[in-house]
Amino acid sequence: MSSATPTPARVRRLPVVGALRLGRPSDVWFKPALSVVAAVAPPSLLLMTLGRLDLAPYTMAGSLCALYAHNRPYAARAKVLARVILGMLGGLTVALVSASLTRNAVVLVTVGALLAAVQKAVCDATRVGPPAHVILTFVSSAALFVPQTLGQVPGHLALAAAAGAWAWLVGMAPAPLRPHGPERRATAQALNAAAAYAETARGGEEGAGARSAAYAAVHAAWQTLLAVRNRPSTTRRALERLVIRAEVALAAPADADPARLRSWARAVRGTGRIPRTGDPRREEDGLRPDGAGPCRTDGGARLDDDSLRRGGDLLRERDELAGVAAERAVAPRPLWSRLGPLTPVAVRSALGCALAGYVSLALGADRPYWALVTAASLYQANITLTWSRAVQRVVGNLVGVLLFAAVAPVAQLGPLALVLCILACNFGAEALIGRNYWLGSVCVTPLALLVTELPGYQPTGELVTGRVVDTLVGALAGFVAAVAVTNRRAGRHVERALTAVDRAREHAARLAADPSSTPAALEAARRGLAAAVVDLRATADAAAGEWWQGALPQERVVLAEQAAHRTLAATVRRRGLLPDPGTTSTYTHTEGASP
């Protein structure tokens, strides 16, 4: 344990301008944008044809499920989308039944706040991914304030379920054309991140930032590849080999070839053949057909050192894939064990949403769900990120109401114009939200206001005024709750993450030093250490933004990361993928390869 003096605690400065800075769009921004349009359009147009556009809010609840799981392999996406749809239906059922049993606004706000807290905790624990709980909370909170009778509930739920089933089909539609599209994208991102780190490895802070990004990208690639727990296909095994090459580049960036890594990434993104890093079964790769060692060519002359090293690389790569298979067989942690650390965030959500709804009611709002949704959308990993989201939400909503004021006259021309405006806002929200949350909110706000006009047109001025007030109330109340309910366990989470890294590093080091350790065991230990390092960085980043807590052991975090990186390199070297330090030969003699 390091005896370094911890840095003193201090109040962090809260960013304003930085929170509004635009970033690069997501690589697949068009996929959720097109998916949500394809999911929303048919049910809405059908209801418009039948003259029942007032029922469109229920079908839209199911259609919005098409926004989820675009980064998951299709086999895993099918399960995630099904669970999201079931979660949406569960929250909608509670909301509709509550709305049919009481019109007491205080009771309805309380129910909405509790639902928001549960949705936030479960989405975070299951790591369902963007847009996480926000869509589910929007659907259930809006339904709470729509007059219902118990007899209407089954029909409305049936509409939502039918639209959800259509959204499931939309989400799965690309599978026949690009069955491994998500895995390809994740692998390409890992290769590009490894290339960026190799280019900046000697660049001080820049190199350190690139290293963290590269490890996170490689870890995300493994998360995607391992999301499907059945036996991997030939394509997925080829992608796993490329991710292994990215890991090799992280372990020895000075020896990596960034141009080659980037060329592999470009090839992987397409629909053509995946670049081959070699096949241990092929003689022309420098191995005997039985894989026992390098073969002889040119009348019995031995291969040169580069070919020998390549043969060793291929054997080691085959062993690494055995370790991947071992990791794939490990059962995930149970849900209840992941919910415990999220208690402070759940309490924040319940308190902030309830406070926002109550204040909105006190100010005379008849449907305070927007204040509740605004508060629910704020809560991030720490106070600093929550503040940034509050700034983004307020700015986006204020600009969005101006856009609604401009669009409303067009939407009021008729039902078709209203549906087309809703579709345009859906597309714009998903296309822009990857640049910055506030930019997407500019389209989300008029979308939400247009949905309120589906049952019948309402005065634009009243809608705009009410939305501005509810936005400010929700942001203020939500942030006050976040400040009041601090995550005092953040420091303990960092300590636990440090302990996990230390244990994983010691275990991997023991296996690397043991000549009798099996390839699968060594690879599983190395992968576990890599996951622990990524988790440590995420935990430390989350805790760094919390206020009013003891100083974090920043130096211990850095030292633990550095030691873990050295151990990762040693395990890669033990596998024969890298030359041993201090040797002059370009080929490391390993079991299964001739000297």
Image: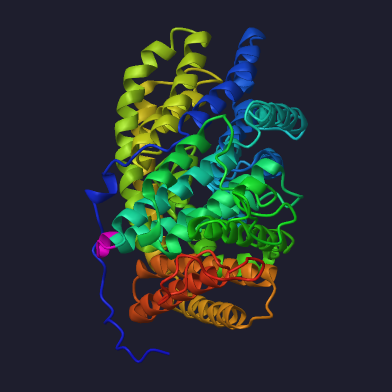
Toward which corner of the image does residue 70 lie, by quadrant? top right
Can you give x and y, in whole percent of width and height, for residue 378 in the image?
42, 51
Residue with the most extreme bottom position: 3
Toward which corner of the image does residue 235 lie, by quadrant? top right
Q: Can residue 511 be seen at all in this image of the molecule?
A: yes
Residue with the most extreme front position: 299
Q: Does the magenta stretch include residue 432?
A: no
Can you give x and y, in whole percent of width and height, for residue 255 in the image?
39, 60
- Give the vertical position of 22 relative to 493 (above or below): above
- Give the vertical position of 122 relative to 591 (above or below): above
Can you give x and y, in whole percent of width and height, for residue 134 in the image?
52, 44
Q: In this figure, which colouring scheme has been used for the structure? A: rainbow
Magenta residues? 202-206
Toward which corner of the image does residue 592 lie, by quadrant? bottom right
Quarter of the image that includes the C terminus: bottom right
Q: Can residue 480 be seen at all in this image of the molecule?
A: no
Residue at image position (50%, 41%) is: 369
Left or right of residue 535, residue 153 in this image: right
Left or right of residue 30, residue 88 in this image: right
Can you give x and y, in whole percent of width and height, for residue 112 in the image?
57, 48
- In this view of the protein, which residue sits in the foreground, 344 or 291? 291
Q: Main secondary structure of the magenta part?
A: loop
Residue at image position (48%, 26%) is: 426
- Give the vertical position of 535 relative to 456 (above or below): below
- In this view of the protein, which residue sits in the foreground, 479 or 327? 327
- In this view of the protein, which residue sits in the foreground, 477 or 435? 435
Quarter of the image that includes the N terminus: bottom left
Q: Does the magenta stretch include residue 203?
A: yes
Residue at image position (46%, 23%) is: 450
Left or right of residue 348, residue 271 in this image: right
